[in-house]
Every structure is written in C-alpha cells, then in structure tokens.
Image (spheres, rainbow, N blue to C red):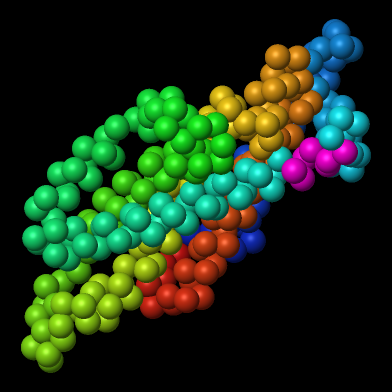
Amino acid sequence: MKRLINLTPSKSTRWLLGILPFALIILIYIVASDARLAENATDKLLPSFGQMGETLNSYVLEPSKRTGEYLFWTDTYSSLKRLLLGIVIAAVFGFTFGLLTGAIPTFHAPVSPLLTVISLVPPMALLPILFIVFGLDELSKVALIVIGVAPCIARDIQRSTLEIPQEQIIKAQTLGASSLQVLLRVYIPQLMPRLISSIRLTLGSGWLFLIAAEAIASTDGLGYRIFLVRRYLSMDVILPYVAWITLLAFIIDWLLLKTSQKCFRWHHQGAH
C-alpha cells in the first residue's frame, strides 16, 4: 500500500485537481447568487453572471458617451503601462544593487545596511510624499511600484549572489579574469533566472501598489475604475475587473516562467 506522500498524480489528474477548486468556487457563487436574487431581484452584492456579462459588454464593446473611449481597454492599457514600466525599472535597480552588494565587499559594507532599512519602510506610507514630490501624474504611480519592488528584488539577488560558490570566483581569477569579467561571465549568467523568479514573486506587490496609487489619484486604470464604482455598490463591474486583474497577473507570470525555461533550461533541469 502506497503512502500518501509517495503518490504522484498523472498529468491529466493534476489538471483535473487544479481545475477542481475553481469549479467549486464558481458553483458556490452561482448557488449563493441565485439564492440572494430569488429573495431580492435588485440585490447588488452577488450579481449573476448574466448581469456581469451585460455590464462588462458595455465597458468592453461600447464607447463611453462622455469620452468616446472603450473604458475597459483604456483602463487595461493604462494599468499595464504603469505596472510594466515600474517592474522593469525596479528589476534594473534591484538587480544592479543586489549584484554589487553581493559580489563586491567594499560596496556591500556601506550600501547593504541602507538597502535593508529601505526594504523595511512600508511603501504605502511614502505615497503622500511621492504625490507631493512628483505630483499626481504617471511618475508618482511608477515611483511607488519601483520603491516597493526594487528593494525586495535587490535583497533576493544579493542573497543569491552570496550563495554562488567561491570556487567559481577563484577559478575565474586564476584564469586571469578581471573584476568586470567575473561579474559578466560568472555572476550575471547564473543570476538572470533568479531575477525572473524574483520578478514573479514581487508581481503581486506591484499590482497592489499600482491599484492603491490609481485609487487615490488617477483618471483611468483598473484600480481607478474599481474604486470609482464602489460608491454605487457596482459589484457587476468590480468582480469582472478583479477577475481580469487576476487573469492578467497569471498571464504575465506564465510568460515569465516560459521565458526563463526557454532561455535558462539548465536552471530548470530536474524541476517538477
């Protein structure tokens, strides 16, 4: 008799088990929505899928009477632009500082303590300061994402840099490699897949900072729309937008994973 810990489901079984929780959530929602709407047809808390579809259709396929824009796609474009710009800048800064503080002791001594302190500052507490310094335009929203994400990436890359065996560094120097060549030939190739993993892990925080900034000061974006319609209890807008944000986050995460697997196959060998 096999122990539970040794049972490995087949590929098709894993797919079924993965879909099962989502199917249960949808089923529970349908039952609860039908029960509430049966008691009160105007109930807004749990709209039916039909109601959400009708409302979403007006956002996706019909231009706004006030602006002439397709609100759903305008919000999506604005949010993705801010998020991706913020994540890219955060990745560049985080990777650079993580690499230098992990590989160069003279850089580690003065910068590493500062990096640790900055990573402990709640980014949301800095939001009013960012609005005062940068104004209410795009820069403050992107800056919040960078400030919130970059220190986490930097500390993760720093830790990964320190984990690289010193034997590799000594061998490279024995062969005549300069400090720059060691960084370029030894450290960076091994840290690139770790950078993608760090970005994947911090994407959730990036979305959180983006939506918070859009909710406070913006005229478009997914976060802006959610907080705009909440005053009307428009769950038929909020729930589809939340589902769309989740889907976008999943797609970005999946693309990053596939990119890492394609470009750094050696890093994923033996992974399940």
Report whether residue 144 is seen. yes
Residue 154 in the figure: left or right of residue 162: right
The stretch in magenta equals: 68-74
Q: Quadrant of residue 226?
A: top right
User: Does residue 28 sit above or below 248 in this rendering?
Assistant: above
User: Does residue 260 sit above or below 15 in this rendering?
Assistant: below
Residue 199 in the figure: left or right of residue 138: left
Give x and y (percent) for residue 141.
51, 38
User: Does residue 200 sit above or below 234 in this rendering?
Assistant: below
Give x and y (percent) for residue 73.
77, 45
* Residue in front for this viewpoint, 214 or 4: 214
* Residue in front for this viewpoint, 267 or 10: 267
Residue 153 in the figure: left or right of residue 131: left
Task: Give the residue at x 55% y 47%.
Answer: 83
Asked if residue 69 is among those painted magenta in the image, a careful observer would answer: yes
Task: Give the residue at x 26% y 57%.
Answer: 98
* Residue in front for this viewpoint, 142 or 269: 142
Name the image quarter holding the C terminus: bottom left
Give x and y (percent) for residue 70.
83, 41
